[in-house]
Image: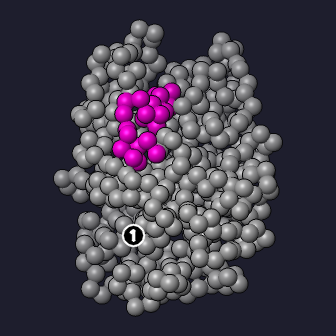
Amino acid sequence: MKKYIGKIYILIFTFGLFQSCSEEKITKFPVTALSEDAFWTSEDEVRQAANALYGSLPNVGQIEWDALTEIMFSQNGPSVEISTGGINPGSSLVNNLWTGQYATIRDVNWFMENVEKAGLSEADLAHYMGQVRFFRAWAHYKLLYQFGSIPLVDRVLGVNEGQVEPSSRATVLNFVLSELDIAIDELSSSEYSPEYGRITKWAVMALKSRILLYEGTLASDNSMLVESAELAQQIINGPFSLHDNYTELFRPEGERSSEIILARVNADLPNGYHSLGQWLGPISFHASWSIYTPTMALVERYPDINGEDISISALYDSEKPFEHRDPRLRQTIFNWMEEVEYEGAMFENNGTWLNFRKWIDPAETAEQRSHNDFIVFRLGEVYLNYVEAMNEINGPSQDLLDLINKLRARGGKGAASDGSDIIVPPIALADLTKDSFREIIRRERIIELAAEGMLYYDYHRWNLLDETMNQPAIGIVPLEDRTFTSPRDYTWPIPDFELINNSNLKQNPGY
């Protein structure tokens, strides 16, 4: 099982690929130190170098980003610091994002400047270059999204070359999109048949579609939204299909699902584990910690079974909040009003927090060692990218609504307590406008993608963080007072150490 990932993590270079990833606290892998002088002599060594970069893919720690939105409460210090208004140039999430992405960029540049020494064929070289180029493009975009104008680094810098001028946002974005186009071409060869977990042209297209949606949301024209939708449609027409059970998709049973475009593969090795189940589970589940928990704001987002908001639903009963609701509510959050026996594991309300069911594997032992793969891109998100972009371009249509209804209907598959299907009626097109359909799409992104670590980016681009993050987080009881300073907090501060090291950088406004 997971033979591929066993190869990926054999090599972790001593120059520190993992030095700032939050996953370093989650997963421990064997480390082999290699001398640079003895490298680049064969394709096997090129493969090892490319594999090492896969450690920078998002892993289960990514879900903490949802705690920077209204839908999740965190007890973890780095996200609490930001959600309570304490973001500053020394914040650990700020520093980790900056140093982690530039570490990835450095390692990609080192790869690109040395890989030709191995004497690979032109086709094989392109396949490796496409994979690593993906990482460099995404790292630059993550920095761009949070910090604005940043140094663009496309080569290995010498010891005395750290004083890099920041490039404009437009320049960095153009570089990112150009890099992704090149990577798509490099990975499009019919001879390229990658193993599960590797970067493919489909993964690059999914990333580019996501970026263009993010950037197109507030752009002055629809050109980026048009391209985002075109890429998404190619993926929808490609070799993927929705997994037939929402719960299983996020458990070991969902690994290698036809819905997954790219997953961070977590090896079934003695020391290759993470503790996501322990982070999310209620205390009654193997003494879990409930570090990341849903809020009532997320619970209230789920409509009734007919797709009506609960504020206007004739079916909703606040005394029985899980009845007649979208089935994904029960598949994402445990019913806090009852003790639940979940496939042999007992889940009991602790009286304060709500608890996620999504990602929980009841087959875990008391050791709390999880091996779930983390889904980076999946078809469900691509549906939503396409629908949102096309609604902003042309407004609602039956074809777009059909994709929303497919996700809703999938949520009912096997969702009844006896494992049978729950019929989820489709939402009707009649009377929908661009504005009203936009609200349905946004709600769908929130509930379909909850606890996958992407909603911060949605709230950010929708300009809703100042509205939602100035409200207290509430579970069974109030949990946390929150503060978001707008417009300052929409752009993060440059880390203090970087301002000291590079006099060309200026601190972002307000910090």
Q: Is residue 383 left or right of residue 417?
A: left
Q: Is residue 54 left or right of residue 305?
A: right
Q: Is residue 154 visible?
A: yes
Judge whether 398 appears above or below 55 on screen.
below
Q: Main secondary structure of the magenta part?
A: helix
Judge whether 490 appears above or below 120 on screen.
below
Helix, strand or loop status at disc 1: helix
Amino acid at circle 1: Arg
Q: Is residue 142 left or right of residue 432?
A: right
- Residue shown at 76% from the left, 72% from the top: 343
For residue 390, what is the image quadrant? bottom left
For disc 1, the neighbor class at 10 Å (few under 14, some 14 to 19, many from 20) is: some
* Residue that extends furthest to the top in the rendered view of this protein: 160
The residue singled out by tag 1 in the image is: 443
* Residue that extends furthest to the bottom in the rendered view of this protein: 314
Q: How is the image coloured?
A: one colour
- Specify the segment rendered in magenta: 80-104
Can you give x and y, in whole percent of width and height, for residue 300 in the image?
A: 43, 73
Magenta span contains residue 96: yes
- Residue shown at 56% from the left, 38% from the top: 22
* Residue that extends furthest to the left in the rendered view of this protein: 220
Can you give x and y, in whole percent of width and height, for residue 289 in the image?
A: 64, 53
Front residue (pair 356, 440): 356
Can you give x and y, in whole percent of width and height, for residue 508 in the image?
A: 27, 32
- Residue shown at 77% from the left, 39% from the top: 271
For residue 283, what is the image quadrant? bottom right
For residue 287, what is the image quadrant? bottom right
Q: Is residue 54 visible?
A: no
Can you give x and y, in whole percent of width and height, for residue 468 in the image?
A: 33, 59
- Residue shown at 68% from the left, 46% from the top: 274
Magenta span contains residue 124: no
